[in-house]
Amino acid sequence: MRILVTRPAEDSKPLIDALTQLGHEGVSMPLLDIALIDGPELDLHGTQALLFTSANGARAFAARSGDRDLPALCVGDATAREALALGFETVKSAAGDVEALAVLVVKELNPAAGTLLHPAGSKVAGDLAVMVQAAGFTYRREVLYEAIKAEHLPDDVLNELKTGTVDAVVLYSPRTGSAFAQLIDKAGARAHLKTVDAYCLSAAVAEQIKDLAWRDILIAAHPDQASLLALLDT
């Protein structure tokens, strides 16, 4: 299959490589551009652990701090791999979503040991703060990057949709799903999705694109890349 990959540019290559191994052809079409926010070295006094809900959060933290000693608890395996690549010494993956990350926090950490620092974007999905605070933890969010939505579909991608050469689209986040739906409507391209399948990382992603005229919407059994790739390998 020829598959549109909507992940940010920094994350698209590993996914395209994985698709190639499955015999598919991935086409990069980032819907979000990640802009790091400049600022001083982060104050980590009293911090017991870092919570990474995306690879972008890990990258943004690494750009603002040289500390790699704090434990890094990550929402999923891809984020954990990025944290390891950035040099973090203690990395654990929740292998799921923010709810799974909150469960991991409760299992691994002690509320009395210090603050949880969540390096994040200007907009976040889920209620991580509410969940960990309900368990007695002190939570602090630092906005270190902004995800800027694309303003239009690239002409070459729109042409591929019109000519029917695209078989599927992979969507990883509710915000990406929302951005895709808005761009499709802006381009007047709803009719061109009738022969295209949507592969979504979660039901929350599928909710954002359910009103488009897809051939089919498929949802990963678990909110991780391995489960999404398993759908494509069937």
Image (cartoon, grey):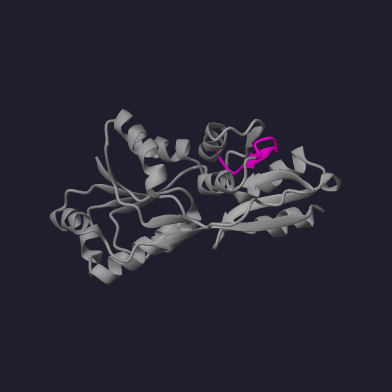
Q: Residue at x 46, y 48 (%)?
A: 201
Residue 8 location (% of width, % of height): 40, 50
On screen, residue 8 versus residue 113, left or right, reads left
Residue 138 location (% of width, % of height): 78, 55
In the rendered image, which quarter is residue 101 located in?
top right
Residue 20 location (% of width, % of height): 29, 32
Q: Quadrant of the C terminus?
A: top left
Q: Quadrant of the N terminus?
A: top left
Determine if the magenta segment contains residue 68.
Answer: yes
Q: Main secondary structure of the magenta part?
A: loop
**In this view, 105 is above or below 156:** above
**Farthest right residue in view:** 112
**Farthest top residue in view:** 21
On screen, residue 9 versus residue 122, left or right, reads left
Determine if the magenta segment contains residue 201.
Answer: no
Q: Is residue 168 visible?
A: yes
Q: Please provide the residue range marked out in magenta.
A: 67-76
Q: How many marks?
A: 0
Residue 143 location (% of width, % of height): 59, 59
Q: Residue at x 55, y 62 (%)?
A: 122
75 vs 149, nearest the viewer: 149
118 vs 163, nearest the viewer: 118
67 vs 53, nearest the viewer: 67
**In this view, 111 is above or below 21:** below
184 vs 85, nearest the viewer: 85
**In this view, 187 is above or below 215:** below
Q: Residue at x 50, y 38 (%)?
A: 78
